[in-house]
Image (tube, coloured by chain):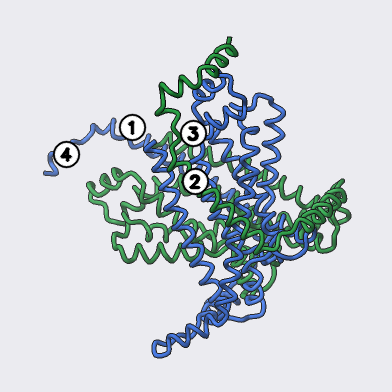
Amino acid sequence: MNGAVLHLPPAQREHALAAYRSAVAAKRVRLAMGLAILAVAIGLAGIAGEIDARKLFDNIHRLPNYLVSITPQLSWANLGGDLAEWFWNLKDWLKLLGDTLLIAYLGTLLGFFGAFALCFAASANLEKRRWVRIVSRRFLEFCRSVPEIVFALLFVVAFGLGPMPGVLALAIHTLGALGKQFAEVVENIDMKPVEGATATGASRVSAIRYAVLPQVMSNFASYTLLRFEINVRGAAVMGFVGAGGIGQDLMEAIRKFYYSDVSAILVLIIATVMIIDLVTEQLRHALLGREQRA
Amino acid sequence: MNRSLRDAVLADRNALRARHSGLFAADITHRLLVTGLIALLGGFALFAFWRLEFSFSRLGSGAAQIAHIVGLMFPPTPGTKLPIFLSALAETLAIALIGTLAAAIVAFPVGFLAAKNVVPNIFAHFAVRRFLDMIRGVDVLIWALIFINVVGLGPFAGILAIAVSDFGTFGKLFSEAIETADKRPVEGIVSTGGSHLHTIRFALVPEVFPVVASQVLYYFESNTRSATIIGIVGAGGIGMHLTEQIRMLEWDKVSFIILLILVAVGAIDWVSARLRHAVIGRSSVVV
C-alpha cells in the first residue's frame, strides 16, 4: 500500500520544502511581531491600570466566597418557605421591574419618533442637500456616542431624581442608534416606486408615505424591537444614578451587603431579560418572514 | 405636462374608481389591525407617562435647566486638572484592553466546548450555552458593583467586570464562529490520520482565528465605551472624574471630559477598524 505513494524527485522535493519553510517562517515572524506589540501594550496597560498580581492572588478567593454568600439557602423539605423568604419583597420588586420595562418602552418609543423624523434627512438618496445630511448625521452620531448613563447623570441634575431623566436619556441614545440604522435601510431601498410617485406629482411627504414606507417599515420595526431589548438592559441600571427602575434597589442591596437580596433581584432581572429576548426574537422572525413572503 | 395628466386623472376619478373597484377598496382587516396596534401602543405609552409621573411643568423647568447647563459648558476647559484627566483616560484604555484580552483568553477554550461540532454531547453544549446566557444577562455596571465588593474600589474591579461580562459574549460568538467553520479542512486532517486535537489545532483554529481576532478588536472598541462608564459606580477610569465633576456642578470640566471621551473613542474606533480590515483582508487571501 505504502509502496504506491509517489515520491517527488529529491531536487523538486527540496525546492518545495524550502518554499514551505520560508512561507511558515514569514508567518511566524509576523505573528511574533504582533505578539511583541501586544505584549508592550499589555505592559503599559498593566502600569496604567494598576494591575498588581499579588493583589489578584490575595483577593481571588473572595469571588467564590461572594458567590457562595449570595446563594440563598434553599432546602427541599421547606422549599416554599425558603423561596418566600428569598423573594420576601417580591411585590415591590415586581413593581420596580414593571417600571423598568416602562422606562425602556417609553425611551424606545420616543427615540423611534425622533429617529423616524431624522432618518430621511440623513439618507443620501432622499436628501440632496449635502449640508442637511451632514448636520443630521453628526447630530445622530453625537446622540449615540455619548453613553446613555452619562445623559442620565446630567438629566438627573436638571430634571430631578426619578424615572423621567432615565426615559429621556434612553430616548436620546435610541434616537442616535436607530436614526443611523433607519437611514441605512432607507439608502438601500428600490428607488423606482419613489420615481413613480414623484412622476404622478406626489409631494415629498406622500412620496415617502406611499413609496418609501412600505419598503422600510418591517425593517424599522425589527430594529426597534432589537433596540427595545437593549434598552431593557440599559433601564435596569438607570437606578444606579437615581434615574428610576429596579437599579436603585439592586445598588443598595449590593452596597449594603444584603446578600440574598442581590441574588433575588439578579434572578428577576435575568429572567425578565431572557423573556423579553425570546418574545422580541419571535416577533422579529414573524416580521422578517412577512417581508420575505411579500 | 405632468400637471395636466394629474388633473385629467383627478377629474376622471369616479370613473376610474368604478372601473377598478378592486384597487380602490381599502383592505378593512389590515386597516383595523394597524389602527388597533397603534391604539394599543399609544394607550400603553399614556399609561407609562402616568405611571412614571411625567409632567409638562417638570419637563419645561428641566429643559430650561438644561439650556442653562449647556450654556455653562462652553468653553470646555480642564482647569488645572488636565494631567489627572489624561491619566484617568489612560487608565480607561488600560481597563478596556486588559479586560477584553482576559475575556478572550478565557473564552477561547470555552467557545470550543460550546460548539456543537467539537463537543457533540447535547447536554454539555446546552449547559455551557445557558451559563454564558446568564452571564450576558447581567449588565457590565452590575458586575462592576459586585467586583467593587470583592476587590475594592479602583480600576482592578473594572477590569474584572469587563472581563466577566465579555466572557459571556465571547463564548457565544466564538462558538458560533466555530460552528459555521468550513468542514473540509477538518475532513482533510482526519483523512491523513490526525487525532481530534489535531483537527482543532490545524483545521479549526486557523479557520476561526481571523474571525475571533476581528471580534475581539470590535469588542475592544465597544469596551472603551463601557470602561468610560464603569467609573460612575467607582470602578476606575475617567467615569469617576465625570461623576465627580457633575456632582460639583463644574460644567466646563464636564464638557471637557465628555469631549475627551468622544475623541478617545473615535480614535480607537478608527485604529481598530483599520486593524480589523487588515485581519479580515489577510484571511480572505489565505482562504
Q: Which mark is residue B123?
A: none
Q: Which mark is residue A215?
A: 3
Q: Which chain is green?
A: B
* Amino acid carrying mark 4 in the image: Val
Q: Which mark is residue A222?
A: 2
Neighbour tally class for label 3: few under 14, some 14-19, many 20 plus, Cα within 10 Å: some
* Amino acid carrying mark 1 in the image: His
Furthest-top residue in this view: B1
Calculate the distance from the C-alpha at mark 4 to the C-alpha at mark 1: 19 Å
Q: Is residue A47 visible?
A: no
In the rendered view, tell whether residue A140 sits above or below residue A54.
above
Mark 4, residue position: A5
Calculate the distance from the C-alpha at mark 3 to the C-alpha at mark 4: 61 Å
Q: Earlier in the sequence, mark 2 or mark 1?
A: 1
Give percent across and percent down for residue A199.
55, 17
Calculate the distance from the C-alpha at mark 3 to the C-alpha at mark 1: 59 Å
Q: Earlier in the sequence, mark 4 or mark 2?
A: 4
The chain containing the residue under callout 4 comes to A
Q: Nearer the viewer, residue A146 or A131?
A: A131
The residue lying at 61 percent from left, 46 percent from top is A112
